[in-house]
Image (tube, rainbow, N blue to C red):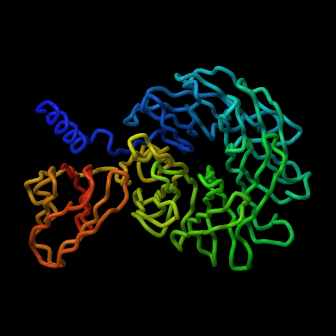
Amino acid sequence: MKRFWCVIILTVLAALFQTASAGWTRTYGGDGHDYGHCAQPTPDGGYIITVSTPSFNLLKTDSLGHTLWTKLYPNGHARCVQTTSDGCYIFTGSMTSSVGYVMWLLKTNADGDSLWSRVYDSDWRLHSGAWVEETDDGGYITVGNTIRSMNGIWLRKTNQVGEELWNQMYGDSYEEFEGVKEASCVKQTSDGGYIVTACIPPSFSPPPRVRGAIWLLKTDSQGDSVWAKTYGGESEEDTVDIAAPGSVIQTPDGGYVVGGTRQLNNSSAVWLLKTDAQGDTLWTRTYGDGAEVCEWLDVTSEGGYILAGWTTSFGAGGADFWLIKTDENGDTIWTRTYGGTRFERCHHVRQTPDGGYILIGETDSYGAGLNDAWLIKTDSLGYIDVKEESHTQVNGNWAVITSIGPQIVLRYENRSDGFHASIFDATGRKVDELHAAGASGMITWGQGYSPGVYFVRDMGESRVTKKAVLVR
């Protein structure tokens, strides 16, 4: 029994005081323009990243964002990366050619060495890959964009070594899809078919004319259309013209959640849309009402959603990374901004195995050059740095006096406006709020709550976050 309790106490202490992977930021690039596109957690605890720099376009890091290796594929422009079931990586993007550029698909081993590379040429002047996913049969599904007389969308299925099995075109030569301009994502659905997101800019919207819309296409396993729906742009005052890359998720009920940007009366906001299995709208949510852009949507381990993009309405200045966490109904749990006084733009977010988040984009405020690729790792609450103050010293006019026990005891002092704190569980879900009117005092919390790790966040000026653990 004594050994059992020793193990429990050591485990709790490790959870409470571990900070090595809680949060950090890294920049990558030289003295010019460098951009980050997509980042994915890897089986070894690190990250694989697609970037655009003069010296490399693939980057592998350890768990703290330190560079392990970089690869440069000349004339290649990698946009999307995924880990594969065999521990390798699959990339898509474009490869520059003598007539423009062509769609590119690259499979590498865990060290970034090429296993095979495919380009898919056509009589179309420009052809680029936007997204790739491994399919249930071990092959790949890609979606890309083409330009001839106007833009079209190309859906392509390959086998395990990138050999084409079939392709389907939407737009240009199909009257039903005329006006579809830019694909952002494809995902395999539970019935073996596919769901595709794209956007229809205002000047190419089909009759009845809309001012720009998000477009959702459901296909069967061979890419033949089952249904197609547009969302937004129903009036002169309402226009939706950006479908966020990676912006569709199939939900457990067979429906879909789509992320995008809603433009209304010369302002923009992040937009979240839930549909049923036939693409009919069930609910929508908007976040922000100034100048906000959604670039990415992902599902969280607790069944909610995480949206990433940037904002010029909040934060430190210019444009900042903006991260929004919601529950399964799209209701906001928390939001965070990251950035300096200039311009930062986030393009991708994924939840990490520890419950935190990894974000990639670019920054003008930090790094070596005009702008650098910027990688951010946060904890489960979206914080980069949790301040671990002494639990017996009052800091920011408050302290956690008892941080491990059946109840948490806090002391605060010299708070003219009283004390206000929010309490979050280890998943980042806010579970309670504390309010005390006196200038000084003590608060006991934890009665009726499950054992585990909690975060106490001062909502006053200090904004200090401290960890505590309930044990029974």
147 and 197: which is toward the camera: 197
Q: Position of residue 166 (x, y in %)?
A: 83, 35
Q: Is 146 positioned to the left or the right of 132 in the image?
A: right
203 and 383: which is toward the camera: 383
**Image height of 96 relative to 365, above or below:** above
The structure residue drawn at horizontal position 15% and vertical position 36%, both measured from the top left corner, is 5
Q: Is 444 positioned to the left or the right of 427 in the image?
A: left
Q: Position of residue 327 (x, y in %)?
A: 47, 61
In which quadrant is the N terminus drawn? top left
Q: Position of residue 55 (x, y in %)?
A: 55, 31
The structure residue drawn at horizontal position 62% and vertical position 31%, both measured from the top left corner, is 90
**Image height of 184 relative to 45, above or below:** below
Q: Which residue in the rendered view is the most extreme toward the front?
A: 1
98 and 390: which is toward the camera: 390
The structure residue drawn at horizontal position 24% and vertical position 64%, both measured from the top left corner, is 458
Q: Is 75 positioned to the left or the right of 44 in the image?
A: right
Q: Position of residue 253 (x, y in %)?
A: 62, 55
Q: Is 114 positioned to the left or the right of 329 in the image?
A: right
